[in-house]
Amino acid sequence: FFNKLLEKYDIDSESLSKASREYSRNKTQKSLEEITQLSEPKWVELFRRLNTISEGTLKLVKLRERIRSLERDNPELKYFDSALLDLFKHWFNPSFLVLKRIDWSTPASILEKIIAYEAVHEINSWGDLRSRLEPDDRRCFAFFHPLIPNEPLIFVEVALTDRMPKKIDEVIKIDRGITSDDDINTAVFYSISSCQDGLSGISFGNFLIKEVVYKLKRKNEALKKFVTLSPAPDFTKWLKEQSIDEDLDEESLMKQAMTYLLYSNREDGFPNDPVARFHLGNGATLARINLNADMSLKGIYQSKGMMVNYLYDPDSLEKNHELFFKTKKVQHSDKVGTLLKKLQIQ
């Protein structure tokens, strides 16, 4: 199918060259429009038309997902991958998206997808899901596109608590006490999952977290602090790359964790950790590093059990965002700064 599209509906390079020569001689609006028209493959228009049919948008998202799975052995498919991504960036503009709360009354067809798409802390049963959605001190929000109302694009799980948690078990264990409304002062973003591989390359997470922060703040004035309890998924891999012995005592492990999170080995100078790059790029600051925070098999395998609290201060997000991309430095709390000096990390 794709080979036929390339064969019959690709760019007419001869006509494009002719139009380019004409434009170089005679720069008019008409000649510019001709170049613009001829420089786009005709099969792009096919995708636009497919988007107008019933469920066409979802089918195109799934089509790109399929393309991405075949690209390794079929490099010519990169043309279609790139073209669909460009179209999706317009069609899935954040201003078009709808924020919805996911709770225990949400249709089962969507709840099943929340279980399937959860990428950070696996949901092992309906009871597990219920403990994350039904209690008064738990929230879940997702972005939907108006043309794909039954498919979440991305969702975030939130715990409303009376403190910044150090361990993930405090948040996701099924048998736990419920924090009363009078005691709630902190919103903890503990899991954020993208749902559609066909939309890979489009960032929704930064818009989702910021919108949820403002939504929660409007609903509950007692909320004073917005933090994450985040994994550090490449920490163990980084230790191996640095040829660092993984069997470290607690102080040495903290020292390496701080080095990994605060200083970069990357050519672009941005933080080593992908989750750190995401939250710091959103304008958050590194508030605290927690050892032995996720002792699940996945947590130990990926990050030696380490997790991180990032602080989202609504009044400082834009300033921190601009500062981070200008300096590439990790903005951190005074507590982290004190620990840096104590461990003599430079």
Image: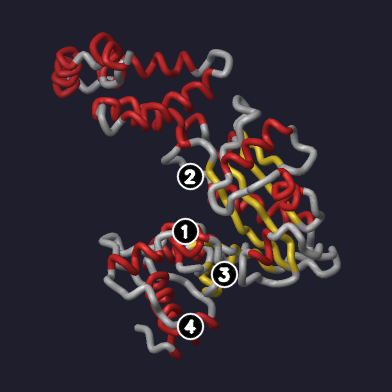
Measuring from the top left, give residue 90's x and y in whole percent.
47, 31
Under circle 3, the secondary element is: loop
Of the two numbered discs 3 and 1 on the same chain, state the one appearing first in sequence: 1
CA separation, marks 4 and 3?
20 Å
Of the two numbered discs 4 and 3 on the same chain, state the one appearing first in sequence: 3
CA separation, marks 3 and 2?
27 Å
Task: Specify whether 244 is left or right of 163.
Answer: left
Q: Amino acid at mark 2?
A: Ser
Looking at the rendered image, the disc whose residue lies closer to the viewer, 3 or 2, is: 3
Residue behind mark 1: 275
Residue behind mark 2: 203
Residue behind mark 4: 337
Closest to the observer, 196 or 36: 196
Mark drawn on residue 293: 3
Neighbor class of circle 2 (other Cα within 10 Å; few <14, some 14-19, many 20+) is some
Q: Amino acid at mark 4?
A: Gly
The picture quadrant where one finds residue 143 is top right
Q: Which quadrant, please, contains the C terminus?
A: bottom left
Of the two numbered discs 2 and 4 on the same chain, state the one appearing first in sequence: 2
CA separation, marks 2 and 4?
30 Å
Looking at the rendered image, the disc whose residue lies closer to the viewer, 4 or 3, is: 3
Residue 149 in sight from this viewpoint: yes
CA separation, marks 2 and 1?
13 Å
Q: Amino acid at mark 1?
A: Val
Residue 101 in sight from this viewpoint: no
Measuring from the top left, give residue 334's x and y in whole percent.
53, 82
Under circle 2, the secondary element is: loop
